[in-house]
Image (cartoon, helix red, strand yellow):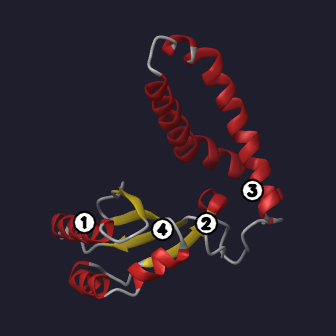
């Protein structure tokens, strides 16, 4: 893992049914504390789609591996994790990702694809999206201030890449990325 690249951590919490509200309060608390740590660059909580099996997905990012290590070795984090034990069914599952790895979650037992394959698939995915935005949305936003156009375009592309385009593209290229299934 590269030391000076941003690091994204993906954590899955399986919450005890009926304790979702308590877990969400816990989640708000640990996030407030984590945000005070140097290098913390934000988080996202994805709530469960299936309420019969509540699994929360939490993604957070640190500027460097050293920043993440400071948080992970802190007394504050240890105390907050202890508070989560009665709220969850199992210890949280954690994954660390740097760079493009966030979008390339290999099947069980397969290694992450080489960086050149991740870069190629990302390029094949983002180029058409940027072209579409330039052709159809940019003219509609021509009167907007440059920072607002940049923010709107970035938000649209990040959301589209994360929730729609990359999941579809990685499935389409799975055989090339990870080898025969």
Res. 5 mark:
2
Q: Dot 3: what SS?
A: helix
22 sits left or right of 174 in the view: left
Q: Are marks 1 and 2 in contact (CB under 8 Å)?
A: no
Badge 1: how crowded within 10 Å, few (<14), some, or many (20+)?
few
Foreground: disc 1 or disc 4: 1
Inter-mark Cα distance, 2 to 3: 16 Å
- The residue under label 1 is 32
Q: Dot 1: what SS?
A: helix
Inter-mark Cα distance, 3 to 1: 33 Å
Disc with the residue nearer the chain's start (1 vs 4) = 4
Disc with the residue nearer the chain's start (3 vs 1) = 1
Q: Name which quarter of the figure residue 73 lies in.
A: bottom left
Residue at 54% x, 75% y: name it. 65
122 sits left or right of 74 in the view: right
Inter-mark Cα distance, 1 to 4: 17 Å
Disc with the residue nearer the chain's start (1 vs 2) = 2
Query: Measured from the top left, where is residue 128 in percent x and y?
Result: 71, 30
Foreground: disc 2 or disc 3: 2
Foreground: disc 3 or disc 1: 1
Residue at 65% x, 30% y: name it. 130
Quadrant assignment for the N terminus = bottom right
- The residue under label 3 is 118
């Amino acid at each position: 893992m590269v030391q000076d690249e941003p690091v994204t951590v993906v954590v899955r919490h399986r919450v005890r049914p009926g304790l979702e509200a308590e877990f969400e309060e816990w989640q708000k608390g640990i996030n407030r504390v984590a945000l005070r740590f140097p290098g913390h660059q934000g988080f996202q909580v994805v709530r469960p789609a299936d309420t019969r099996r509540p699994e929360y997905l939490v993604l957070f990012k640190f500027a460097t591996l050293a920043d993440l290590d400071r948080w992970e070795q802190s007394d504050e984090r240890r105390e907050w994790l202890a508070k989560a034990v009665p709220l969850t069914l199992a210890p949280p599952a954690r994954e660390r990702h740097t760079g493009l790895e966030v979008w390339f979650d290999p099947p069980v037992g397969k290694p992450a694809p080489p960086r050149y394959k991740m870069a190629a698939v990302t390029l094949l995915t983002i180029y058409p999206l940027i072209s579409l935005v330039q052709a159809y949305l940019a003219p509609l936003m021509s009167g907007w201030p440059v920072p607002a156009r940049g923010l709107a375009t970035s938000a649209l592309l990040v959301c589209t890449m994360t929730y729609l385009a990359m999941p579809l593209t990685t499935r389409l290229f799975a055989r090339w990325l990870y080898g025969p299934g």
